[in-house]
Amino acid sequence: MLEAVKELGELVLEKEKKDILTSLVEDPNSNSRYNNVCIIKFKKERDNLYYQDVEREEYKKDYILKYLYRSGSANGPDFSPTAKLTEPEKTFPMKILGWFNKTLKDKTTNLSNEERILLIKIQEELEENREDIISKITEMRKEIPKKESIFITIKIEENGEEYYPGDFEIFRRLLIENVEKKDLEIFSEDKVCSICKEKKSVVIGNAGVYAFYTLDKPGFITGGFDENLAWRNFPVCLDCKRALEEGKRFIKENLRFSFAGISYQLIPKFIFGKEEIKDVVDIFVDSSKIVSLKKEVKKAYLADEDEILDILSESKDVLTLNFLFIKEQQSAEKILLLIEDVFPSRLKSIFLAKGYVDRLFNENFTFRTIRNFFSKSDPNKREYDLDKYFLELVDSVFKDRVIDRSFIMDFLMRRIRDSFIKDEYLSICINEALMVVVFLEKLNLLEMEVKDMEARLFDSLFKKYEPTFEAPVKRGLFLLGALTELLLRRQYKDRGSKPFMKELKSLKMDQKDFIGLLPKIQNKLEEYDAFDKGKRLIAEEASHYLLLAGDEWKMSVDEMNFYFSCGMNLVQEVANIVYTDKESIKEEIELEEG
């Protein structure tokens, strides 16, 4: 993955012809939350400089180089006097004032006399007006909604012109120098870079481009806990580090999407020469093209937000795609899942299966549909706690790995049972569950039992959803579910309630329960004088398939109840076959209206 990030970074650097400073500076508002800028303003008149006020400004995209922001240590100053605000009483002394204190104390810092005087004057003014500055920053924080964030910087007014850190050569130079110093804290000479595999004059051991790599945690211990030998963990040359940083920045700003509500980064890896696949490369290194593609893809294809996967699925297998699902926690980054080397041809197979489901159900099937069953273990929970299982499923789909049927049925039936007990959205829930199963079966990801059977009454219905019902027991349970639903509707019509519901045991029935259910349904229908020819045909077919299934069904309780509930939900399609009279169909199916 890192090689792919580095390669993309090299392409962007080449295309945009960035100098070192431009590639080092970060956008403080890359996540679109830092739209408020807290300005500590100074005024310079000849040789005098004094503090004026704290002002609020709106963030400007074209001011990124002026802000000159680059994040540094969590417990120390950043690489310039620009910082993201956490708590005013901490951020100001540590990040803003702290930058000047550290710079002026560092004897290795190369400053001209004029530059040193400027920094000292700013430092003295910041120190002298510390309380007023913190107080005004605090007030500004209170005035801005909590969901909006702030970053702080300085501005100097001189002769009617306003200058930010990036307008001063001293701040620009020190940022570059300090980054280089940080890089060379842990290094070795004449060693092989782990990214480009070339021997370089210098490799560093603390590249730290991604925050999930750190040297202060157990595990990163090559060198026997000796920090001077830590370069052995992850030796990276300075050229590759720069390309990695640029690649990461570009991905974060342009190739970050949402997959069923979970953020992911799309990282391309080019297999053949870049000149041969120039059009594909251009998609990934041209920000304007990416924005254009996002606007073009109006329909939710696989996920539910800006997607370019549908367009990429039409590409030849000249590249692979890496999907990095990553969760940012304060200054740390946690990899939830990395799906590597997905070919466009695999995406095409997934889209074809999705299209099949869309047409079959006349719905827009997406991974959001699957996510509905893999969100919360308890509907009353505030947080999503099933991300791990959902992403395991996504990984199997993208990597063409067979999925355990019991794993799927467990999660599908959890939600179906909850809807059944609450008597809320049951039809929608079962329909979505069936869509999930058909989608996975179309991709050959579920091992399904398929058995040759003689032609029967409901063949056309089962063929419609093949291979979902290509086993006798599944057909028998399905028809049993349809017959049960017809009984429940008859009860509701005659009594205004459904007492037979208790026989369904909250959809936790086992094989013995299902075998005993058919005669109970027949008896109840006889009591209501409702066991007509249509229902007798359904009962006969259900009996036939259950007998054909034999004694060993080899199905979990979840799976048995799933096919049963599908029959309850698709009762209309069953009734259309056994009742040729439209009025009879209407009477049987619409009993609950009103």
Image (cartoon, grey):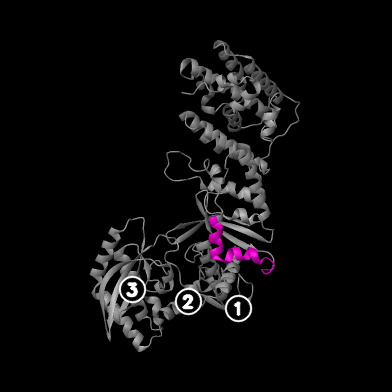
Is residue 448 part of the magenta span, yes or no? no
Q: Which region shows up in magenta? A: 273-295
Binning the other alpha carbons within 10 Å of mark 3 as few (below 14), some (14 to 19) or many (20 upward) gives many
How many numbered marks are there?
Answer: 3
Quarter of the image holding residue 67?
A: bottom left
Which residue is more in the foreground, 80 or 212? 80
Looking at the picture, does residue 45 appear above or below residue 535? below
**Amino acid type indicated by mark 2:** Leu
Looking at the picture, does residue 551 appear above or below residue 1? above
**Residue 343, visible in the rendered structure:** no
Q: Which residue is mark 3?
A: 154
Image position, residue 205 (x, y; %)? 53, 72
Identify the element where label 3 is drawn: strand
Any mark on residue 128, and which?
none
How far, Cα to Cα, is label 2 from label 3?
19 Å
Q: Which residue is mark 2?
A: 21
Which residue is more in the foreground, 144 or 170? 144
How far, Cα to Cα, is label 3 from label 1?
39 Å
Image position, residue 589 (x, y; %)? 56, 23
**Amino acid type indicated by mark 3:** Ile
Image position, residue 46 (x, y; %)? 28, 86
Identify the element where label 2 is drawn: helix
Of tags 3 and 1, the one toward the viewer is 3
